[in-house]
């Protein structure tokens, strides 16, 4: 199963030269994401707690003289993303640790990092919004979708307090939140807390009934088309 490539790009822009990355700094590479990468934010939060600094770069319009620890995430399985991955592997060799849906649907962060709060400051574009998952998974099996294979049936992975980190605006990335058995409770809590919610992966209309429609109307839904500027292509 492959994930369609959805990366925009333009040629002719300058490279960002980062020089030598300090030994106390971990380089985080968002290979092709169109929305902030939760795995990289969790890595950033975890390692900052350990005393490291983190540096985020996107796409491949950058270069470094040296780096001692590099983590990368590749979301899409397409020629452009895989070319960027190949360049990363050639550049960093064993120093590079890479994962993501574009490469391996089963590879997971270590539990202690997966459960660590995301560092929202990694993407300044997020402003005062939180971003992440309350639930993962979906009971359906659309043939074009990686979620059934990657996540399986719906399960809750976070509570609102853990996800929000005291914020009141949130971008939800849940695959199909309405398919979770506790969906109504989660929607009620969002409404009662007067959260501003972006259901970024949309809502499954098949699972909206009269009660849920009423709950959804009580939620301050604020969708935003683009959370990040598109990644520009590097040289072929
Ligand atoms: S309903 Fe959505 S999340 Fe579920 S399998 Fe279909 S496309 Fe994927």
Image (spheres, helix red, strand yellow):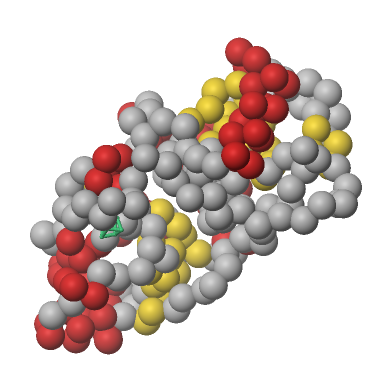
- Which quadrant holds residue 91? top right
Is 122 above or below relative to 47? below
**At which x and y percent is residue 124?**
64, 57
Is 32 above or below relative to 171? above
- Which quadrant holds residue 16? top right
Figure disc tally: 0
Residue displayed at 77% across by 38% down: 236
Residue displayed at 60% across by 39% down: 79
Pick whichever, 52 or 226, lies toward us.
226
Residue 227 in view:
yes
Asked whether, in this view, residue 1 is left or right of residue 92, the answer is left
Is 123 above or below relative to 21? below
Residue displayed at 55% across by 55% down: 6
**At which x and y percent is residue 235?**
80, 40
Residue 192 in view:
no
Asked whether, in this view, residue 197 is left or right of residue 20, the answer is left
């Amino acid at each position: 199963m492959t994930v369609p490539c959805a990366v925009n790009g333009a040629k002719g822009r300058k490279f960002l030269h980062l020089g030598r990355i300090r030994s106390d700094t971990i380089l985080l590479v968002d290979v092709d994401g169109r929305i902030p990468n939760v795995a990289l934010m969790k890595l950033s939060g975890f390692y900052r707690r350990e005393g490291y600094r983190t540096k985020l770069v996107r796409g491949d319009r950058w270069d470094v003289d040296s780096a001692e620890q590099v983590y990368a995430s590749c979301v899409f399985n397409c020629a452009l993303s895989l070319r960027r991955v190949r360049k990363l592997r050639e550049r960093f060799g064993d120093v590079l640790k890479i994962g993501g849906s574009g490469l391996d649907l089963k590879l997971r962060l270590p539990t202690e990092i997966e459960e660590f709060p995301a560092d929202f400051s990694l993407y300044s574009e997020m402003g005062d919004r939180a971003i992440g998952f309350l639930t993962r998974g979906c009971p359906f099996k659309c043939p074009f979708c990686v979620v059934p294979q990657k996540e399986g049936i719906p399960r809750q992975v976070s509570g609102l307090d853990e996800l929000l980190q005291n914020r009141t605006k949130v971008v939800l990335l849940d695959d199909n939140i309405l398919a979770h058995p506790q969906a109504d409770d989660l929607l009620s809590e969002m409404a009662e807390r007067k959260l501003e919610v972006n259901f970024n992966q949309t809502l499954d209309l098949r699972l909206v009934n009269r009660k849920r429609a009423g709950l959804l109307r009580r939620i301050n839904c604020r969708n935003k088309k683009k959370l990040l500027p598109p990644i520009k292509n590097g040289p072929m």
